[in-house]
């Protein structure tokens, strides 16, 4: 009885004092449980930081506790190797994200605001591709890329990634464009604006934050792609970061300090992206577009 | 204005998809035209390919585990975070859930490969440290254990994306519903069971679909940790497809594996859409 009424006053915004008391009641064990989970989540990373600052002999003596002097040169070594992979990642993921934003916003605008024959049918044909898994297309895509003579070029990543990445983009952006009042676009047309002008000067500026969401989701997807680049790019120096880190670990497996330094350095770019776009990250992962 | 999109989709999505279905009926090697052999590839898969059958078992095992670990555990964590009343801790934990998303997946996989290392890995070091020498293993090298090592990687298995999606669902439940529930005496466990969970079935359903699709298809962890070995004990269909296509050049056969994976995801998705109903308020 008492518990119930207390939480009710808390919710209804009762007297400040009882509110403060009841507000935090029960937080103790929940905070503890979540805290332990978070600590376990971060433990491998802490291990990586500790090991990344060790020379091989330091690792042999004391593997999992910090040792001095700290060997920062592991990072210098890793930078030299990782930077080429990172550059490749920026080129491929960057070009992909630009292509995806352009194409998916154009298509989404047409699907939402320009009536053309067969519009719904075409839209469902695009949606149906959501159901086609990468496993079905892996082998034929590879053969296609080979026949187009794109093997060992970054286009072998960029073009298929644009094609695949725009589907979710179209979905999210179409929902947004449909929520905009159609009268606004009609008014522009009456004033003599072409569809291209409306798209570029009216629709795109209005959708800036949604474009950000699409961009973030797209970058996360391409950045983590491990296997496809190893197929289409025979030369390691062309590889983006994710397969690059894998090959780096294979190559230097016994220099544990250098391996860990490389893995940590390789994690930094996404962290930086996250710092600048944290709001879009959370929005992108929780937005209404990703709901049945 | 949809022309560029359609052009890209035709070349890089529709064409490979159709070609995959078509080529699955060929005895097709790289560079050769190939012979049409009807459904022989599929017959061989299910009657004469022990590795494929084992890979299906492993896939089922992993997918069930991913459902428990990702969907189950994430729901628990999302509810825990949702119930925390102090805004600042709530915000902190929510932010923390992003961590596994922004650390590249390959980094976590490789860190766990190191953790499982038989001679220098910390897992064995911890076991020895607490006096359980007998429990130490070459985790990724023993055929009977390797699949479980792949399965239990990324302990404690929290999936930040799922937690955030579920949390958004929980936060969207109108306060009035919870309040009237409280008035009717539904607090704690009953509030969860009869009010909150039914109202986030939409999100849970979505996560189940995504997890099944992912569980059926995902093989980058296996690829990076074991390449399907030792003695095919961690083989999954995706890895087996990769092996057939790119190691021994049986591309038609690999396409057939791709088609089977596609059909499994399709059936699972349809069943899920049909039999789990979501509630609206």
Image (cartoon, coloured by chain):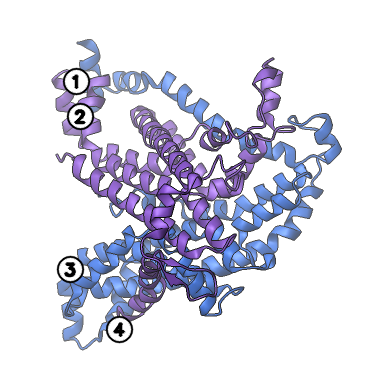
The residue to which callout 1 is attached is B186
The residue to which callout 3 is attached is A181
Q: Quick one: label 3, few (<14), some, or many (20+) residues within 10 Å?
A: few
Q: CA distance from mark 1 to mark 4?
A: 56 Å
| Residue under the image location 36 percent in, 65 percent down | B38
The residue to which callout 4 is attached is A197
Q: Which chain is purple?
A: B
Q: Quick one: label 2, few (<14), some, or many (20+) residues within 10 Å?
A: some
Q: Secondary structure at mark 4?
A: helix
Q: CA distance from mark 3 to mark 1?
A: 42 Å
What's the mark number on residue B169?
A: none
CB within 8 Å, label 2 to label 1: yes
Q: Quick one: label 4, few (<14), some, or many (20+) residues within 10 Å?
A: few
The residue to which callout 2 is attached is B195
Quadrant of the image containing the C terminus of chain B: top left
Give residue A163's quadrant in the image.
Answer: bottom left
Q: Secondary structure at mark 3?
A: loop
């Amino acid at each position: 009885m008492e518990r119930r009424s207390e939480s009710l006053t808390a919710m209804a915004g009762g007297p400040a004092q009882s509110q403060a008391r009841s507000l935090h009641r029960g937080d103790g064990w929940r905070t503890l449980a979540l805290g332990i989970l978070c600590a376990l989540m971060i433990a491998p990373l802490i291990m990586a930081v500790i090991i990344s600052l060790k020379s091989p002999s330091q690792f042999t003596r004391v593997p999992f506790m910090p040792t001095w002097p700290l060997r920062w040169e592991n990072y210098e070594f890793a930078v030299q190797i990782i930077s080429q992979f990172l550059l490749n990642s920026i080129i491929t993921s960057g070009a992909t994200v630009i292509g995806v934003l352009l194409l998916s916003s154009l298509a989404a605008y047409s699907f939402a605001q320009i009536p053309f024959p067969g519009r719904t049918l075409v839209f469902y044909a695009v949606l149906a591709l959501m159901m086609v898994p990468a496993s079905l297309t892996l082998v034929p895509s590879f053969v296609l890329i080979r026949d187009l003579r794109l093997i060992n070029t970054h286009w072998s990543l960029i073009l298929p990634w644009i094609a695949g990445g725009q589907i979710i983009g179209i979905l999210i952006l179409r929902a947004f464009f449909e929520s905009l009042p159609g009268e606004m676009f009609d008014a522009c047309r009456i004033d003599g604006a072409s569809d291209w002008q409306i798209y570029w000067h009216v629709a795109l500026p209005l959708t800036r934050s949604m474009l950000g969401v699409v961009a973030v989701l797209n970058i996360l997807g391409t950045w983590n792609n491990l296997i496809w680049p190893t197929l289409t790019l025979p030369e390691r120096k062309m590889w983006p970061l994710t397969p690059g880190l894998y090959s780096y670990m294979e190559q230097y497996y016994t220099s544990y300090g250098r391996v860990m330094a490389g893995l940590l350095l390789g994690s930094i770019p996404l962290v930086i992206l996250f710092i600048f776009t944290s709001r879009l990250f959370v929005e992108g992962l929780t937005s209404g577009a990703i709901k049945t | 204005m949809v022309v560029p999109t359609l052009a890209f989709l035709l070349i890089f999505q529709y064409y490979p998809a159709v070609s995959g279905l078509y080529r699955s009926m060929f005895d097709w090697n790289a560079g050769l035209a190939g012979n049409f052999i009807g459904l022989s590839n599929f017959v061989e898969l299910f009657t004469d390919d022990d590795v494929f059958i084992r890979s299906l078992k492993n896939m089922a095992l992993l997918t069930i585990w991913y459902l428990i670990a990702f969907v189950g555990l994430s729901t628990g964590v999302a509810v825990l975070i949702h119930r925390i009343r102090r805004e600042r801790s709530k915000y902190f934990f929510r932010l923390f859930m992003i961590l596994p998303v922004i650390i590249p997946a390959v980094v976590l996989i490789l860190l766990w490969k190191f953790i499982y290392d038989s001679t220098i890995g910390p897992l064995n070091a911890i076991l020895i440290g607490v006096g359980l020498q007998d429990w130490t293993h070459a985790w990724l090298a023993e055929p009977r254990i390797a699949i479980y090592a792949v399965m239990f990687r990324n302990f404690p298995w929290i999936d930040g994306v799922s937690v955030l999606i579920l949390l958004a669902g929980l936060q969207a439940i109108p306060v009035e519903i919870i309040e009237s529930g409280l008035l009717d005496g539904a607090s704690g466990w009953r509030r969860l069971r009869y009010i909150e969970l039914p109202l986030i079935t939409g999100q849970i359903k979505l996560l189940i679909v995504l997890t099944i699709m992912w569980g059926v298809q995902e093989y980058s962890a296996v690829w990076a940790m074991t390449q399907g070995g030792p003695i095919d004990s961690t083989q999954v269909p995706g890895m087996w497809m990769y092996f057939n296509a790119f190691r021994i050049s049986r591309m038609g056969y690999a396409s057939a594996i791709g088609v089977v994976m596609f059909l499994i995801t399709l059936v699972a998705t349809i069943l899920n859409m049909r039999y789990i109903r979501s509630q609206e308020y």
